[in-house]
Amino acid sequence: MTDDSQQPAGLNRSVPGTIDLLLSRRSGSAKAMTPPGPDQHQLRTILRAATRVPDHGKLFPWRFILFEGVARSRFGDLLAQTLKETEAGVSEERLQTEKARFLRAPVVVVVVSRVREAIPIPEWEQILSAGAVCQTMLIAAHALGFVANWITEWPAYHPLVRERLGLKSGERVAGIVYIGTSAVPLEERIRPELDKIVTRF
């Protein structure tokens, strides 16, 4: 393993185009993704960027579960099995949908929020840090030319799925981030008017 913590010498602190990048970022639906997704170097870059979010107390209150290749279909089988065990009369159509859930994108990252209790750092700040991880992943994926979608859906909240993912006490799914290439043109959506959401004290 290499040390990813070292900064490149002479890091440019004024990166042209950064604001344009932020103002052009938008999510692409996981349902409309196709290969290619990030390769191993690009995925590592996305994850490294995500670990640079604000983190009061240097707690690293998050971790990642990666799904690539056949792992995506194995997770789909797990979801289908979970439904068979917990929902009476689940349809074959629904089971097939769940089996294909993580096949929608070439790379899927589950971001796990892990809160430490009984310490001075508020729980809320630790949870917000995990949210910042998800958002930074979206920005990094966009910077590398991919499209990403941060969602959760029912698997993030089902106790049996959480158990089978290996989540421990104090851990929750902060987001499921799908990363790939959009199969359709991205359309801009309505953004809030700043005058309606900004006040001065």
Image (spheres, rainbow, N blue to C red):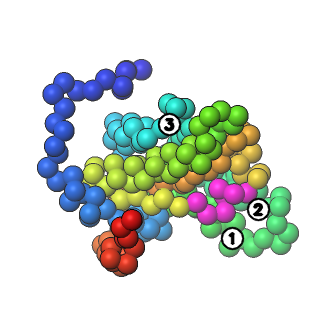
Q: Which of marks 3 and 1 is in front?
A: 3
Residue type beneath disc 2 = Leu
Point 48% across, 68% down: residue: 31
Residue type beneath disc 1 = Arg
Rendered location of residue 45, percent (x, y): 34, 38
Q: In this view, does 128 lie above or below 10?
A: below
Point 42% across, 53% down: residue: 135
Quadrant housing residue 87: bottom right
Residue 108 seen in the current view: no
Q: Which of marks 3 and 2 is in front?
A: 3
Q: Give the range drawn in magenta.
A: 152-158
Rendered location of residue 136, percent (x, y): 39, 49
Find out whether the residues at labels 1 and 2 contact each other: C-beta distance under 8 Å: yes
Residue denoted by label 3: 56
Disc 2 element: helix
Q: Which quarter of the rendered picture does the C terminus lie within?
A: bottom left
Q: Which disc, if any, is residue 146?
A: none
Q: Is residue 127 left or right of residue 179?
A: right
Q: Which disc, if any, is residue 94?
A: 1
Q: In this view, does 19 lie to the left or right of 49?
A: left
Residue denoted by label 2: 83
Q: How far apart are marks 3 and 1 (CA)?
A: 42 Å
Nearer the observer, 85 or 70: 85
Q: Residues within 10 Å of mark 2 (few under 14, many from 20)?
A: some
> Does the magenta segment cover residue 155?
yes
Residue 31 seen in the current view: yes
Q: How far apart are marks 1 and 2 (CA)?
A: 9 Å
